[in-house]
């Protein structure tokens, strides 16, 4: 590594992303599952958007929220994968300082948005099951648009201080980031000043967003389960609960790796760095965008039927 990467500086023009430290020799092989997951995520989410747009019967709150989730997943995965693949394939780890902060903002902003969309979906399921006769009057298109705007504004405003704080710290150690993307704490830890404000604010965002969102989702499902158990027959209970299955699956696929990744980076000092980065990339940032359209496609009959008609029509 050249001396310019280890000498003192206060305003680095570029950072160097290492990819997955310790596994550099296997970068090309690691890129295969990464590229596959990304391709499936792009295809699956664009398919969801296309199906909802072209099928008038799917123009309802549940599918509008699903489209928001698809767009969020597309932006989230695209914020990471192109640069990561360029590191794996061409050893092109250099990234402009401003571009690094922009990538950091998009990753964390859209992660917060995705969590907010799950809350909105839980509210939709709550109204649909607990008060079905008023579902169409409560969740009108105007209300859905307001919820979507609130989700976007919350994510945008909460994560904005990440970049502002990271920009004001002096960087006098190194510009080498032992990661495949500009993760918030991976960047801030390179600063030579007191970064406790960034660290504490990051923890505040994580626990307030995840804590509040999981709380609201839990409360929604407590009411949903109470309504389900009050139904007269077992078949009715299973059928009603089945409408929540997709939502529960994508929630678990998002929150468990998310919490693991954030906590490991701050407190998991005994966890191997390459293992943490693989978890952060695949399980947290790539698996949900890939799994979400598959889960909804497999478990939602309306989407299945539209796909079948689409492929049958093409064959004819």
Image (tube, rainbow, N blue to C red):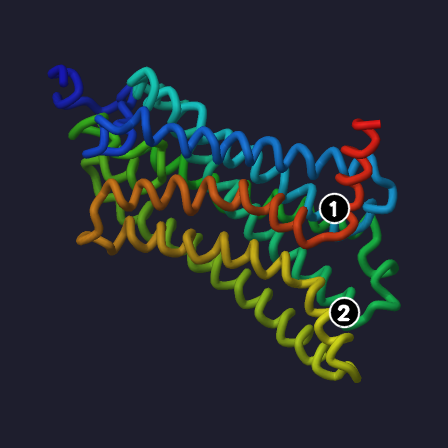
Residue at image point 67% right, 63% down: 244
Residue 301 in picture, x, y percent from top left: 76, 52
**Residue 134 at x, y = what percent?**
86, 66
Q: Quadrant of the C terminus?
A: top right
Please state which of residues 159 and 139 is positioned toward the viewer in this rendering: 139
Quadrant in the picture for residue 119 = bottom right
Indicate whether 294 appears above or below 11.
below
Q: Secondary structure at mark 2?
A: helix
Q: Would residue 77 be found to the left or right of residue 179 on screen?
A: right
230 is higher (above) or lower (below) than 29? below
Mark 2, residue position: 129
Tell me which residue sits at (32%, 15%) in the image: 90
* Residue in the foreground of this view, choosing between 195 and 36: 36
Q: Which residue is mark 1?
A: 304
Which of pointers 2 and 1 lies earlier in the amino acid sequence? 2
Q: Is residue 56 visible?
A: yes
């Amino acid at each position: 590594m050249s001396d310019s990467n280890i000498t003192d500086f206060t305003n680095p023009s570029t950072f160097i992303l290492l990819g997955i430290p310790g596994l550099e020799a296997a970068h090309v092989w690691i890129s295969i599952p990464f590229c596959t997951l990304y391709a499936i995520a792009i295809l699956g989410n664009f398919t969801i958007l296309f199906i909802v747009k072209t099928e008038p019967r799917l123009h309802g709150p549940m599918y509008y929220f699903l489209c928001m989730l698809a767009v969020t997943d597309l932006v989230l995965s695209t914020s990471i994968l192109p640069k990561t693949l360029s590191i794996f394939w061409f050893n092109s780890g250099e990234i402009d300082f401003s571009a690094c902060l922009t990538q950091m903002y998009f990753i964390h902003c859209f992660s917060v948005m995705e969590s907010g969309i799950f809350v909105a979906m839980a509210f939709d399921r709550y109204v649909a099951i607990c008060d079905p006769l008023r579902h169409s009057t409560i969740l009108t298109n105007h209300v859905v648009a307001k919820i979507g705007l609130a989700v976007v504004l919350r994510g945008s405003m909460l994560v904005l201080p990440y970049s502002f704080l990271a920009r004001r710290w002096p960087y006098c150690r190194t510009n080498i980031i032992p990661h495949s993307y500009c993760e918030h704490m991976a960047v801030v830890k390179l600063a030579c000043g007191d970064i406790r404000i960034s660290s504490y604010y990051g923890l505040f965002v994580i626990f307030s967003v995840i804590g509040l969102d999981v709380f609201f989702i839990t409360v929604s499902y407590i009411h949903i389960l109470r309504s389900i158990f009050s139904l007269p027959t077992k078949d009715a209970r299973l059928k009603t609960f089945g409408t929540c299955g997709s939502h529960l699956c994508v929630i678990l696929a998002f929150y468990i790796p998310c919490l693991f990744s954030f906590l490991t980076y701050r407190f998991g000092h005994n966890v191997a760095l390459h293992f943490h980065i693989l978890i952060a990339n695949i399980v947290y940032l790539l698996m949900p965008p890939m799994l979400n359209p598959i889960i909804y496609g497999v478990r939602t009959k309306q989407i299945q039927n539209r796909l079948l008609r689409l492929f049958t029509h093409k064959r004819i």
